[in-house]
């Protein structure tokens, strides 16, 4: 059976590859000529023989991923192009870019990863958005490496802010206080942003005044280790190539757990919010996120809060970032546990901070538990040896990682409670700024 643009082709009879090359192919149309071909985002050695995972673009727009094998002596560009042409669906309608994109602040929270941060900042400074700023939030630093990088290398091009309290949500809230944009975008220090990323991510806000949040496409920057390949096979962070809009006034018929399946809306490495809406909902719950006992869930909490407040959320695959997955098995084990903990931690946060949602959550709880069991289930490797469709559930997933995810789910509420005690009494930083301004006026 041929694969769809959302499910890369799997070479028949292949075993799990030690490495998959990541590439980009740009075509002049579904049957058109090759406009460009090479390693993803211009990095790495030229694409050669062996397994290739490729982003397919049509005249620059991301439309699909394909996986194929370039035989010895084969032409990589021709092989990938032939696979793409055989699998591409008709292109979706193109939306013109609005004339006036909103002033945007890009917030990058980081902690002791100056080398990765420099790579991310280089891609952010190359954005084609006409009006934006970059704010780096140094979270609970133990050295001056991040400060020195920003101040010495980027000067006025990047703003540096320090947040002494550990936790990704706390750092993001500090970024919200520092930001001056009408839209606030968030990404991580381990991504490389496509040059059109910020324009594509913020365009929906110009088109729709009722939009509260936008998310975008996240693809793997490298598939060099078995752990990276397995994570991407498990679903990675990608949410497909079809734009989707989530409207609380018109819940999607095909998602009975809406809005509590927040993981299907997007991920924290590629999200943006209207600034007024983000402050209206109280920002991110400081007891969630990486760096806290809750382990995660800060982005999921924000997505559901935006929808619960009556605002729309849009997923736009034109807004692309490349994510550097962690490389080691221990990193993958930590992520599996963290995913489980973050899931139940964010649900706990919703119940604690938005109790009006409790009846809806209780009605959907049995189906939600069944869904959680299915997405964390052990699966034999079988023929699924390369990245597949997000949510297709035909990927391999080892039993020990399944157990770790479920243990994390059990621990999430306890972790959230511990984190909540740690941040008790912590004011929202933009409220602090407002209070300082009022005192100065007096």
Image (cartoon, rainbow, N blue to C red):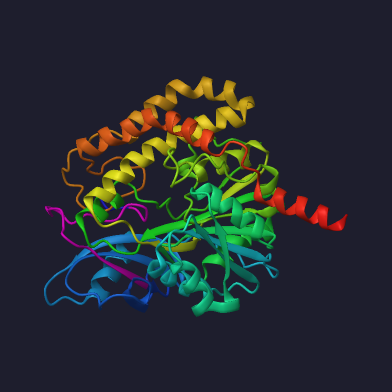
Residue at horizontal 49 percent and vertical 49 percent from the top: 166
- The percent position of residue 406, horizontal first and vertical second, equals 32, 31
| Quadrant in which the C terminus is drawn | bottom right
> Where is 214 relative to 70, above or below?
above
Q: Is residue 333 above or below residue 38?
A: above
As rendered, which of 240 and 417 lies closer to the eye? 417
Majority secondary structure in the magenta region: loop
Of residues 384 and 187, the one nearer the viewer is 187
Measuring from the top left, give residue 126's x and y in whole percent. 51, 76
Q: Percent from the top left, x then y, of residue 139?
A: 50, 56
Q: Residue at x 47, y 33 (%)?
A: 418
| Relative horizontal placement of residue 231, taking residue 280 as reference (left or right) | left
Q: Quadrant of residue 322?
A: bottom left
> What residue occupies the far right of the structure in this picture?
442
Q: What span is in magenta?
A: 4-25
Q: Is residue 227 visible?
A: yes
Q: Is residue 418 left or right of residue 22?
A: right
Q: Which percent across, then down, holds residue 10?
A: 22, 54
Instruction: Name the residue nearer the viewer: 13 or 101.
Output: 101
Is residue 163 rendered magenta in the image?
no
Question: In front: 94, or 260?
Answer: 260
Residue 10 within the segment the image draws in magenta:
yes
Give the residue displayed 21% in from the left and 36% down from the top.
400
């Amino acid at each position: 059976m041929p694969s769809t643009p959302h499910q890369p082709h799997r070479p028949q009879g292949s075993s799990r590859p030690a490495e998959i090359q990541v590439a980009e192919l740009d075509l002049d149309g579904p049957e058109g000529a090759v406009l460009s071909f090479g390693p993803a985002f211009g990095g790495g050695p030229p694409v050669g023989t062996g397994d290739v995972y490729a982003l397919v673009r049509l005249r620059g727009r991301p439309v699909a991923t394909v996986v194929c094998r370039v035989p010895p002596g084969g032409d990589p560009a021709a092989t990938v192009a032939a696979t793409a042409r055989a699998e591409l669906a008709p292109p979706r309608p193109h939306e013109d870019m609005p004339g006036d994109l909103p002033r945007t602040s890009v917030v990058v929270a980081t902690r002791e990863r100056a080398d990765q941060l420099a790579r991310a900042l280089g891609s952010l400074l190359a954005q084609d958005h006409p009006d934006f700023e970059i704010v780096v939030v140094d979270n609970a630093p133990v050295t001056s490496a991040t400060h020195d990088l920003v101040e010495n290398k980027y000067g006025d091009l990047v703003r540096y802010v320090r947040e002494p309290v550990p936790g990704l949500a706390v750092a993001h809230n500090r970024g919200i206080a520092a930001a001056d944009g009408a839209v606030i975008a968030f990404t991580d220090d381990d991504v490389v942003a496509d040059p059109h990323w910020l324009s594509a991510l913020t365009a929906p806000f110009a088109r729709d005044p009722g939009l509260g949040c936008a998310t975008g496409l996240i693809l793997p920057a490298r598939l060099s280790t078995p752990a990276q390949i397995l994570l991407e096979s498990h679903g990675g962070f990608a949410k497909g190539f079809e734009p989707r809009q989530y409207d609380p006034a018109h819940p999607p018929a095909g998602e009975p757990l809406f809005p509590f399946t927040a993981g299907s809306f997007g991920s924290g490495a590629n999200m943006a919010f209207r600034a007024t809406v983000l402050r209206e909902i109280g920002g991110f719950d400081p007891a969630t996120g990486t760096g806290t006992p809750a382990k995660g869930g800060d982005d999921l909490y924000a997505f559901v809060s935006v929808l619960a407040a009556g605002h729309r959320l849009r997923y736009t695959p034109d807004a692309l970032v490349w994510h550097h997955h962690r490389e080691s098995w221990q990193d993958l084990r930590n992520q599996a546990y963290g995913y489980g903990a973050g899931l139940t931690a964010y649900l706990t946060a919703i119940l604690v901070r938005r109790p009006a949602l409790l009846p809806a959550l209780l009605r959907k709880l049995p189906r939600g538990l069944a869904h959680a069991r299915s997405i964390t289930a052990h699966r034999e490797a079988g023929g699924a040896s390369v990245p597949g469709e997000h949510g297709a559930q035909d990927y391999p997933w080892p039993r020990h990682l399944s157990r770790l995810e479920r243990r994390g789910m059990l621990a999430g509420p306890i972790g959230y409670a511990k984190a909540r005690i740690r941040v008790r009494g912590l004011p929202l930083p933009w409220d602090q700024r407002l209070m300082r301004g009022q005192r100065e006026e007096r």
